[in-house]
Amino acid sequence: MPRHIVRMAKRRTAWESASTDELIQAEFLDRHGGLDLRPSVYVFEAHDVQAKHELVVRLRAEHAVSLMKSPNAAGPHVDFKGVTPRPPEFSEGTTRFSLANRVHHEVVLDDQAELHAMLSAARADLANRLLPVSRDEVLDYAGARLAAEDPEWVAVLNEGSKPEWKKLVDKHWAAKAHPQ
Amino acid sequence: MFEYLAHHDSSRLLAMVTTLTPAQLTHAAEWIGRSGDPRSWTVLASMLRHPSALVREGAIIGLEALGAAALQHAKPLLIERALEDSEPSPGVRAAAMDALSLLALG
């Protein structure tokens, strides 16, 4: 099965940037403004395109609800398959979900030149690497997991620490149940 | 830094916008929205016509963070950003559509 190395984008437009340097500035700085030479990725296998998409939606939802205040930004995410200088190293994730934590890895890079080379290689073949995920798909997934009483989702959304998410998931599902 | 300023010194955050690169401004815009500063809407609305798609997307995310009233007030500008005739970036169009969907949810 193909092994995918998926980077979750912070901004949809970052990969539209005219230069790799701007992409680095927008997406690959750590919270202190330094270069992120251990960028996070999710590594998984999927037997076909549909299975890959479903896993990306799930991982996006788990990643975003754990680490973001609201489900604002969403993809497109990028598959680094074949362009990392070495295999990503396992690094347990810090999400609230066992799957996302289990498949979380880091691409360990020596320096800015190596980061630049990896991103330039991905940009050269970008159309085949983009993995778009819409916010509606994320909200659909989150609502379905809540409806199924998935304990991980119930714990995250019903404990009160993610009010923006809960409100939006509830509204999204109410609108689906009663379309105007 | 933007998060800290949003919580502790939103005036300084707003004053910084002219000094930042687009790659910085896209993230600053989100925190300008999160600051809840009453001057945020005007700053974010002006960013919706910034030459950089990164900044325009950041402005949309900032307006979402600012709240439903801010989004409603920006609706004509968001529609402009959602249309192919007036917005060249697919990423900005998608973000604007998401914001308009959010508005439609009420």
Image: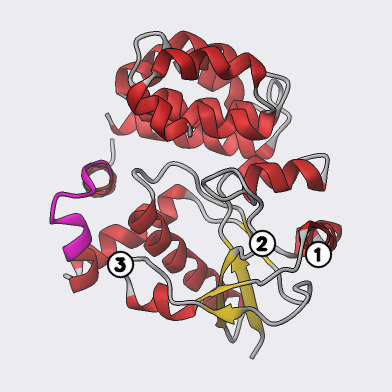
**Quarter residue A117 falls in:** bottom right
| Residue located beneath label 3 in the image | A96
Amino acid at pointer 1: Glu
Q: Is A138 left or right of A132, judged from the image as shown?
A: left
How busy is the neighbourhood of tag 2: few (under 14 within 10 Å), some, or many (20 plus)? some
Q: Is residue A161 magenta?
A: yes
Q: What mark, if any, has residue A37 been given in the picture?
A: 2
Which callout, 3 or 2, points at the residue further toward the start of the chain? Answer: 2
Name the amino acid type tagged 2: Leu
The image quadrant that residue A78 belongs to is bottom right
Q: Quadrant of the C terminus of chain B?
A: top left
> Which numbered disc covers residue A114?
1
Instruction: Look at the image and say whether residue B33 sits in the magenta stretch.
Output: no
Residue at screen point 64% across, 14% down: B18
Residue B64 in sight in this render: no
- Bounds of the magenta segment: A155-164
Q: Is residue B74 left or right of residue B51?
A: left
Q: Secondary structure at mark 2?
A: loop
Q: Secondary structure at mark 3?
A: loop
